[in-house]
C-alpha cells in the first residue's frame, strides 16, 4: 500500500486545483478596468484552456492505467525510481508541516530562535546527528545570524514576542 | 566596442566587482559540488543580495556563479557516480567508470581542462554574437519585442523535459503570478485581496526561492540518500591535461556544439552534454571503450557543458529570453539590478555585456585553478548527506527570502510557492517555464499596451512580427510533435535540475 504509485491521481488533483485557480483568475479579471484587464484575462483564459486539456488527459490516463493499460503511469513508475508513492507523499507532507511550523514559530518567537529550534529538531531528532554536532551547528547558525545582522545590517523577523536578536 | 571592452575590464578589476565575482564563483563551486542541488537554487539564493547593488557587481556575481557550476559538478559525477547537475549526466558513463579503475585524477584533470577551454570558447562566442548582432537592432520595435517575449515563453514551454503541454501551462501560470499587483497602463491593483504586501507584486526572489529552492530542500529531506563512499583521487591530474591537448580537435568541436546549443532557448546543458558525448562516440574510430571508461567520453561532454554558458547568455541578455532554469533566474536578477534585458542592451549597456564576457573568462579560469589545486579537499564536500545539509539550507533560504521586502508576507509567499513548487516537482511538471513566464509577464503586458497604443491593430502586420509569429507557431505546434518521435533525454532540457545551466 505504502509503495503504491500515485503519480496519476496526484496530477489529477493538482490539475483540478490549477484549473480552479485559472477560472477564478479569468473571472476576477472581468472586474478590472479595460486597460488593466486584457493581459490577466488572456492569461486566465489560456490557462483555463490548457488546464482543462491537461485534466481531461490525466483523467483518461488514470482510467486507462486502472484498466491495466501500462502505456502511461505504470510504465513511468517502472522506468523511474523516483515515482511518487503514498509513502513519499506522506513523508513530504510531514516535512512541509515542519516548514509551516517553522514559519509559524518565526511569527511568534522570531526567526533566530525559531531557526535554532528547527535545527535541533531536524538535525538531532530527524537526522540522528550527535548532540555535539547539533550544538555546534546551532552555535554556528546563531553566529551567522549575528555576523550578518551586525556587519551586513540584515534584519530578521522579530515575531510577536519582539525578540530583537542579531539584527 | 573597444572602449566598452576596456571599460568593462577596468570595472571588473575593481575590488568591489572582483569580490562579488569571487563570491559568485565560490557559491557556484559549492552548489556544483553538492549532488542534487540545482544551479537554479544557487542562483535564487544570490538574488536577495542584489538589492541596491551596483549592476556591474551584481552581474559579475551572477555570471561567476553560472559559469563555474559546470566545472565543479564534475566531482560528484566522477567520484560517486551521482550527477552534480543535469549537465554532467553523460560524464558518469566514462568518468565514473575510469575513477573506479583508479584513474580519478586523470579524469578530473581532463574534465577541468576541457571545461576551461569550453568556457573560454563560450565567452568568445558571446563576444562574437553581440558584435555581429548590433547592426540588427535598429529594426526592432515594441511589437517585435512582444513577439520575442512570446517566443521565449513558447520555446521554454515546448522544450522542457517531459510534457510540452505542462510546459506551456507552467509558463502561463508564471505569467499569472507576474501580473499580480499594479497594472502598468491604469492605476488598478489586481489579485491583491486587500493585502498591502501584494500591492507591489511578488518579488522574483520569492518566486525563485519558492519554486526552486524550497522543493530542493524537501527533496533532500525526503530522499534520505545514504552517505556516499567516494573513490580515492588516484593518479596525476596533469595526465588529464595532456589528454585534452591530445584531443584538442574534439574539445573545440564539442565547445562549438555546446555554444550553438546554448544560444537556442530551451536546450541547456543536459542536451548539449549528451549530444557532445554522442558526437564523440560517433566520430571515434575505436568505440569499444565508450561506456566502460574512455577519456573522450569525459572531454567532449565537459567542454560542451561549459561552453553552453557563453551561448546561453546570448538570448538571455540580448533578447530577454532565458535558455534554461538558471538563466531564467538570472534574468530576474538582471531586472532586479535595474537593467532591461533585450536588444536595447546592445546599445545602452554594451559595457555590461562586455563585463559578462570578461566575467565568464575570469570565472572559468578561477574555477579551474581552484578545482585543480583543491580537488582533494573539495571532493570531501560530496560526502555531506542531504539530511544534514537540508536544515541549514532551509534556514538560509527563508532568511534570504525575508530580505526581499523585510515583510512577514515574504515568508508566507515562499511557503505557499514552495508547496506549489514541490507539488509540481513530484508531479513531474516543469517549474522553469513558470519562472520565465513570471519574468516576462510585465514586459508582455507593457509591450502589448505600447504596441496597441502606437500602431493600433497594424502592429500585427509588421514583417518582423509575422516572421517571429510564424516561429512561435512552429515552436508550439511542430516541436512537441517532433519530440514525440525522439528520445526525451537526448533532445530536451532538464530545466529543473541543472546546475548553472
Image (spheres, rainbow, N blue to C red):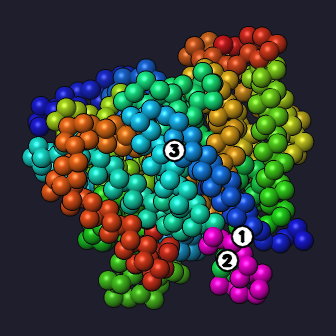
Observer-nearest residue: A120 or B482?
A: B482
**Where on the picture, by quarter, is residue B252?**
bottom left
Real-space CA distance between mark 3 and mark 2, rounded to the nearest whole angstrom: 27 Å
Residue A113 shown in magenta: no
- Given the image, what chain letter belongs to the residue carrying mark 1? A
Q: Are marks 1 and 2 on the same chain?
A: yes
Judging from the image, what secondary structure is the residue with disc 2 in? helix
- Callout 3–callout 2 Cβ contact below 8 Å: no
Residue at the disc numbered 2: A61
Residue A62 shown in magenta: yes
Q: Quadrant of the N terminus of chain B?
A: top left
In the image, which residues are magenta? A56-71
Q: Residue A68: give x, y in percent of width and height.
A: 76, 87
Residue at the disc numbered 3: B176
Residue at the disc numbered 1: A8
**Depicted B318 relative to depicted B260: above or below:** above
Principal SS element in the magenta part? Answer: helix
Real-space CA distance between mark 1 and mark 2, rounded to the nearest whole angstrom: 7 Å
Query: Is residue B244 among the parts visible in the rendering?
Result: no
Is residue A52 toward the left or the right of residue B258 in the image?
right
Amino acid at each position: 500500500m505504502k509503495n503504491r504509485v500515485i503519480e496519476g491521481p496526484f496530477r489529477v488533483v493538482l490539475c483540478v486545483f490549477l484549473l480552479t485557480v485559472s477560472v477564478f483568475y479569468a473571472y476576477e479579471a472581468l472586474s478590472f478596468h479595460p486597460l488593466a484587464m486584457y493581459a490577466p484575462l488572456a492569461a486566465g483564459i489560456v490557462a483555463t484552456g490548457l488546464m482543462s486539456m491537461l485534466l481531461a488527459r490525466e483523467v483518461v490516463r488514470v482510467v486507462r492505467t486502472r484498466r491495466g493499460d501500462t502505456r502511461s503511469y505504470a510504465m513511468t513508475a517502472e522506468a523511474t525510481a523516483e515515482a511518487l508513492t503514498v509513502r513519499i507523499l506522506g513523508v513530504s507532507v510531514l516535512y512541509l508541516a515542519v516548514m509551516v511550523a517553522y514559519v509559524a514559530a518565526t511569527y511568534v518567537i522570531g526567526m533566530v530562535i525559531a531557526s535554532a529550534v528547527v535545527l535541533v529538531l531536524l538535525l538531532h531528532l530527524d537526522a540522528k546527528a550527535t548532540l555535539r554536532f547539533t550544538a555546534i551547528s546551532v552555535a554556528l547558525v546563531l553566529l551567522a545570524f549575528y555576523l550578518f545582522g551586525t556587519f551586513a545590517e540584515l534584519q530578521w523577523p522579530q515575531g510577536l514576542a519582539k525578540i530583537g536578536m542579531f539584527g | 566596442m573597444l572602449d566598452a571592452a576596456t571599460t568593462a575590464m577596468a570595472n571588473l578589476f575593481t575590488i568591489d566587482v572582483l569580490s562579488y565575482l569571487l563570491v559568485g564563483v565560490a557559491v557556484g563551486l559549492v552548489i556544483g559540488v553538492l549532488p542534487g542541488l540545482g544551479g537554479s537554487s544557487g542562483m535564487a539564493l544570490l538574488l536577495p543580495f542584489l538589492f541596491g547593488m551596483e549592476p556591474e557587481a551584481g552581474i559579475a556575481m551572477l555570471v561567476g556563479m553560472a559559469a563555474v557550476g559546470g566545472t565543479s559538478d564534475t566531482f560528484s559525477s566522477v567520484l560517486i557516480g551521482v550527477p552534480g547537475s543535469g549537465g554532467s549526466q553523460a560524464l558518469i558513463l566514462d568518468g565514473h567508470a575510469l575513477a573506479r579503475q583508479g584513474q580519478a585524477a586523470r579524469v578530473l584533470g581532463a574534465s577541468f581542462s576541457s571545461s576551461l577551454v569550453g568556457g573560454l570558447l563560450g565567452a568568445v562566442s558571446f563576444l562574437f554574437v553581440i558584435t555581429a548582432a548590433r547592426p540588427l537592432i535598429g529594426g526592432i520595435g515594441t511589437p517585435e519585442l512582444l513577439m520575442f517575449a512570446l517566443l521565449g515563453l513558447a520555446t521554454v514551454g515546448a522544450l522542457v523535459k517531459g510534457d510540452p503541454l505542462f510546459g506551456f501551462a507552467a509558463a502561463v501560470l508564471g505569467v499569472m503570478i507576474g501580473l499580480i499587483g499594479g497594472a502598468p497602463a491604469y492605476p488598478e491593483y489586481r489579485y491583491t485581496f486587500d493585502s498591502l504586501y501584494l500591492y507591489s507584486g511578488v518579488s522574483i526572489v520569492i518566486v525563485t526561492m519558492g519554486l526552486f529552492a524550497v522543493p530542493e530542500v524537501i527533496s533532500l529531506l525526503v530522499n534520505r540518500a545514504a552517505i556516499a563512499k567516494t573513490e580515492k583521487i588516484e593518479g596525476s591530474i596533469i595526465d588529464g591535461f595532456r589528454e585534452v591537448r591530445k584531443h584538442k580537435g574534439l574539445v573545440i568541436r564539442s565547445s562549438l556544439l555546446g555554444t550553438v546549443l546554448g544560444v537556442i532557448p530551451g536546450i541547456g546543458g543536459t542536451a548539449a552534454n549528451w549530444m557532445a558525448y554522442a558526437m564523440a562516440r560517433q566520430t571515434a574510430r575505436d568505440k569499444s571503450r565508450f561506456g566502460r571508461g574512455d577519456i573522450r567520453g569525459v572531454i567532449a561532454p565537459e567542454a560542451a557543458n561549459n561552453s553552453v554558458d557563453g551561448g546561453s547568455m546570448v538570448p538571455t541578455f540580448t533578447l530577454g529570453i532565458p535558455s534554461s532554469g538558471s538563466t531564467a533566474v538570472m534574468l530576474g536578477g538582471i531586472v532586479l539590478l535595474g537593467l532591461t534585458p533585450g536588444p536595447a542592451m546592445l546599445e545602452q549597456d554594451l559595457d555590461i555585456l562586455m563585463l559578462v564576457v570578461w566575467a565568464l573568462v575570469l570565472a572559468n579560469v578561477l574555477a579551474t585553478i581552484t578545482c585543480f589545486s583543491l580537488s582533494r579537499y573539495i571532493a570531501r564536500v560530496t560526502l555531506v548527506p542531504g539530511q544534514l545539509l537540508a536544515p541549514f539550507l532551509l534556514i538560509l533560504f527563508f532568511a534570504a527570502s525575508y530580505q526581499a521586502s523585510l515583510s512577514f508576507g515574504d515568508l508566507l509567499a515562499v511557503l505557499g510557492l514552495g508547496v506549489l513548487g514541490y507539488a509540481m516537482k513530484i508531479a513531474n511538471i516543469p517549474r522553469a517555464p513558470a519562472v520565465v513566464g513570471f519574468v516576462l509577464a510585465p514586459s508582455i503586458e507593457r509591450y502589448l499596451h505600447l504596441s496597441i497604443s502606437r500602431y493600433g491593430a497594424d502592429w500585427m502586420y509588421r514583417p518582423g512580427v509575422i516572421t517571429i509569429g510564424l516561429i512561435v507557431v512552429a515552436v508550439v505546434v511542430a516541436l512537441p510533435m517532433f519530440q514525440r518521435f525522439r528520445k526525451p533525454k537526448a533532445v530536451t532540457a532538464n530545466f529543473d535540475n541543472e546546475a548553472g545551466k
